[in-house]
Image: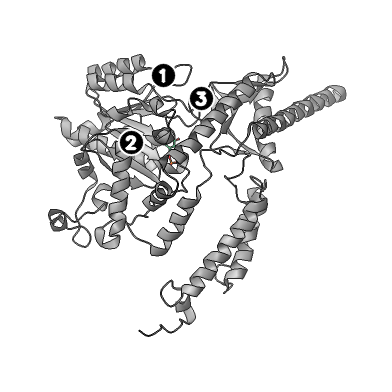
């Protein structure tokens, strides 16, 4: 065996058997920078686009630095210094989780080997590993022996594909020609459902009013009786319901629609049921709260986002279906990729089930997570954040400075700062908006915002088991401080106006 000669010139940057020392050194240097940054970073520096924009614009992309160290120095300035750090216990804003180390290891391995999960001859074992994880997930859901699915880029893509399959099933079932049936198709989802349902409907060529929002109860769960009425109304009007989308974990309220009652209504009406469990899927591995997903096993399709409640890095999501044959609606044969003959030879390929072609081996992250720490440990982490949300709710409910909307079944808390009696409602709204911005700008914490009944609210999405009740109490003090400061500045300005007038 001869040793390969070291690579020179442009080829020295290629990853191969001749460049392994450079690969190790570059990746280690990158890991080192991240390590040093994370050791001291807050949740966010508070940088604004106005300040960061010029720094990034000033980088001359046609003049390479030629050297990893220099590029990393620059990266500190343009990215690492001011990134938003989800691992930080006072990042309480969106559905972004801290990530587990086995998944980061998976990320490093999968990008170096760079398998593409479209065909067997671009992935080999990767295809089989993804299939095992799809089967494992479908088993956890309880979808039965004919289930299948595919990894996707995220919950939005999973929902899109679920609705694509539903549209094709519905069109196949109607006697009308396709172009006449398409504008009549309807999708029912709750008012608190995810916006990707609307976006998907648009991309699927449905009518602008195709998505019907079903009323929710006080806990922001779909009301099954209203759903049943809407199904009946559509039937009378000759509008085929191609899918009911139930949400297991709404983005704002963490509410889980009553799945058994919704499944009953769907069964009576012969409607397809899709369950969007992008957020709530973490309950699949909870040893104490799995029952909250009861009824999910009756779905025709399910969206799960491992990058939300399984502590996986972006991207990692999947769509599962009860009946594997519906995936044929995503199949098209091309001679250069997946000739029909290969299917006859039973060579496994995933591209026949996916809306993507070249596709990351994201499943490897979940694989290593399950093999190193196991599903119970993931569920334990998710249970801890759900517990923390209950504590946050209790804190807020007992605090006269705030009003809290609803007790989440998962890990969100929606609330608002309450101004002193007699404050103009518009000022109260502005005070909440201001408090959120000022908190982010201070770099001391990040909370999210949303609207409830037309009013600005603040939101915690707790996904970090390291966040303590003390962190939450501290952030609430900061929020109240910013809101009160805003209101007193407003009052002072109004007083000045009066004095001047
Ligand atoms: C986040 C979310 C989605 C979209 O998932 P992405 O991975 O962001 O595309 C869909 N549905 C619900 C309920 C979500 O919370």
Residue 56 visible to the viewer:
no
Give the label, 3 or 2, closer to the camera. 2
Residue at x 42% of width, y 25% of height: 256
Q: CA distance from mark 3 to mark 1?
A: 18 Å
Which of the 4 image quarters holds residue 239? top left
The residue positioned farthest toward the right in the image shown: 499
Is 323 situated left or right of 378 in this image?
A: left
Residue at x 65% of width, y 32% of height: 472
The residue identified by callout 3 is 408
Q: Is mark 3 within 8 Å of ligand 1?
A: no
Towards the viewer: 23 or 317: 23
Residue 431 visible to the viewer:
yes
Towards the viewer: 222 or 173: 222
Q: Earlier in the sequence, mark 3 or mark 2?
A: 2
Q: Is mark 2 within 8 Å of ligand 1?
A: no
The residue identified by callout 1 is 215
Is 19 drawn above or below residue 455 in the view shown?
below
Q: Position of residue 248 (x, y in %)?
A: 40, 29
The residue identified by callout 2 is 140
Label number found at residue 430: none
Label 1 secondary element? loop
Mark 3, residues whose alpha carbon is within 10 Å: few (<14), some, or many (≥20)? many
Give the label, 1 or 2, closer to the camera. 2
Is 481 situated left or right of 319 in this image?
A: right
Q: Earlier in the sequence, mark 3 or mark 1?
A: 1
Q: Position of residue 487 (x, y in %)?
A: 75, 26
Q: Is mark 1 within 8 Å of ligand 1?
A: no
Picture quadrant of ligand 1? top left
Towards the viewer: 197 or 339: 339
């Amino acid at each position: 065996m001869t040793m390969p000669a070291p690579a020179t010139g442009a080829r020295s940057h290629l990853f191969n058997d001749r460049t392994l020392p450079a690969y190790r050194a570059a990746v280690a240097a990158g890991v080192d920078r991240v390590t040093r940054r994370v050791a001291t970073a807050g949740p966010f520096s508070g940088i604004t686009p106005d300040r960061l924009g010029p720094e990034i614009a000033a980088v001359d992309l046609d003049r390479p630095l030629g050297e990893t160290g220099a590029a990393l120095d620059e990266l500190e300035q343009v990215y690492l210094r001011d990134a938003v750090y989800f691992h930080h216990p006072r990042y309480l804003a969106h559905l972004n989780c801290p990530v587990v180390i086995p998944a980061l290891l998976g990320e490093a391995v999968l990008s170096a080997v760079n398998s593409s999960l479209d065909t067997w001859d671009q992935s080999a074992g990767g295809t089989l590993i993804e299939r095992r994880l799809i089967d494992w997930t479908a088993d956890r859901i309880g979808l039965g022996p004919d289930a299948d699915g595919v990894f996707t880029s995220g919950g939005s893509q999973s929902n899109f594909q679920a609705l694509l399959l539903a549209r094709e099933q519905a069109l196949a079932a109607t006697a009308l020609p396709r172009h006449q049936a398409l504008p009549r198709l309807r999708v029912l989802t709750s008012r608190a459902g995810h916006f990707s349902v609307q976006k998907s409907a648009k991309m699927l060529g449905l009518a602008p009013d195709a998505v019907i929002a079903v009323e929710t109860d006080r806990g922001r769960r779909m009301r099954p009786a209203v759903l049943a009425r809407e199904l009946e109304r559509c039937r009378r009007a000759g509008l085929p319901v191609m899918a009911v989308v139930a949400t297991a974990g709404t983005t704002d309220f963490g509410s889980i629609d009553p799945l058994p009652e919704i499944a009953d209504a769907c069964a009576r009406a012969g409607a397809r049921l899709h369950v969007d469990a992008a957020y709530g899927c973490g309950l699949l591995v909870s040893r104490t709260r799995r029952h909250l997903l009861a009824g999910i096993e009756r779905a025709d399709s399910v969206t799960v986002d491992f990058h939300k409640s399984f502590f996986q890095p972006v991207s990692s999501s999947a769509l599962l279906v009860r009946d594997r044959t519906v995936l044929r609606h995503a199949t098209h044969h091309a001679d250069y990729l997946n000739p029909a003959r290969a299917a006859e030879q039973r060579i496994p390929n995933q591209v026949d089930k996916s809306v993507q072609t070249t596709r990351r081996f994201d499943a490897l992250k979940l694989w290593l997570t399950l093999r190193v720490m196991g599903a119970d440990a993931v569920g334990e982490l998710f249970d801890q954040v759900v517990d923390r949300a209950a504590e946050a709710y209790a804190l807020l409910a007992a605090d006269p400075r705030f009003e809290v909307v609803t007790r989440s079944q998962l890990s969100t808390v929606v609330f608002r700062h309450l101004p002193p009696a007699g404050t103009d409602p518009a000022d109260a709204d502005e005070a909440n908006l201001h408090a959120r911005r000022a908190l982010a700008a201070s770099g001391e914490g990040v909370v999210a915002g949303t609207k409830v009944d037309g009013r600005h609210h603040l939101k915690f999405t707790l996904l970090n088991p390291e966040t303590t009740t003390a962190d939450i109490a501290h952030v609430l003090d900061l929020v109240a401080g910013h809101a009160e400061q805003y209101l007193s500045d407003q009052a002072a300005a109004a007083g000045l106006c009066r004095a001047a007038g």
